[in-house]
Amino acid sequence: MSELVSAAEAFVMTEQSRQDATIVTITEPDANGEEPALTATEQLATYFYEDVRQVLRRAGFDLSRELGAPPEYADDAELFLRLLCADMERLWQYQLITGLALMLTTPIERLGDPHAVLYRAIYRVRQSLDVEQGSVRLRPVLRLSDGLGDSISAATGARAFLVAEWTRDAALRRVPVRPPRYHFAWVPTQPALFDENALPLAQRYDALAPASGDLTLLQIAAE
């Protein structure tokens, strides 16, 4: 897959930033060989869909336009969200990404300024060799939530970004992410940097699960 190399985009978490996080741990079948009802990637994509749908209702902006989708998707936000989540589930399934972050930010005053984050929703999959026996119907899930807060619906000119934790595996990076396997042609465009000095250590991205990829903005390529 071809990648565009450019200056990093910086995102600043402040004391007012809200954050939700969902971490799904991949586990092995239990002693009886039973598999969970949902795979780890299916479960993570389900949380992503439900959460983003609520965010879009509160924020009231066109996510398809923000991510570079063809203009016809602006008339059907629900369809776009379903296709988006299906593509993200495949990216997790094929191990092209291990993490995803939806970022809502305030407008910047000057080109090159860091983006102040209003809200960040993190979705990550992690491996575990140390799994508690018992529940096999669902993957072990960690959900942490600040909630959206009133600033999301009141924000004027808010922007949305999708940041992916992209694989460092050279062979996987060459795999094309485009139709027909995916609904959209996805490209990692530029590196993303998180300034998290205002957050407690336990709430920072790397503390939620060990990083295994490179943080990069994800966009839909123009056809």
Image (tube, grey):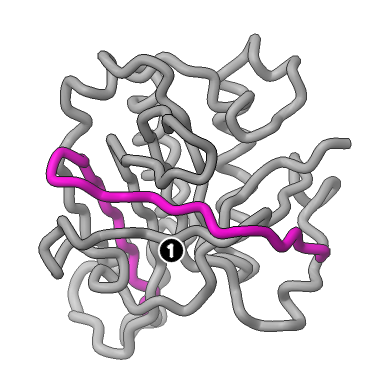
112 above or below 107? below
- 34 displayed left or right of 142: right
- 163 displayed left or right of 84: left
60 above or below 181? above
**Quarter of the image with the C terminus in it:** top right
Residue 7 highlighted magenta (yes or no): yes
Q: Hey, what amino acid is under mark 1?
A: Ala
Q: Nearer the viewer, residue 212 or 79?
A: 212
Residue 167, image quadrant: bottom right
At 45% from the left and 62% from the top, the residue drawn is 99
Query: Where does residue 1 sit, x and y in percent of width and height?
Result: 81, 65
Question: Looking at the magenta stretch, what is its main secondary structure?
Answer: strand
Q: Nearer the viewer, residue 39 or 74?
A: 74
Query: Where does residue 149 sit, x and y in percent of width and height?
Result: 17, 27
At 15% from the left and 38% from the top, the residue drawn is 16
179 above or below 124? above
At 71% from the left and 29% from the top, the residue drawn is 69
- Residue at the right extreme, as displayed: 223
Q: Which residues are magenta?
A: 1-27
- 217 displayed left or right of 117: right
Q: Nearer the viewer, residue 150 or 143?
A: 150
Query: Where does residue 160 sit, x and y in percent of width and height?
Result: 47, 33
Residue 195, image quadrant: bottom left
The crowding category of the residue bearing disc 1, from other C-alpha atoms within 10 Å (few below 14, some 14 to 19, many at least 20), is many
Residue 198 highlighted magenta (yes or no): no
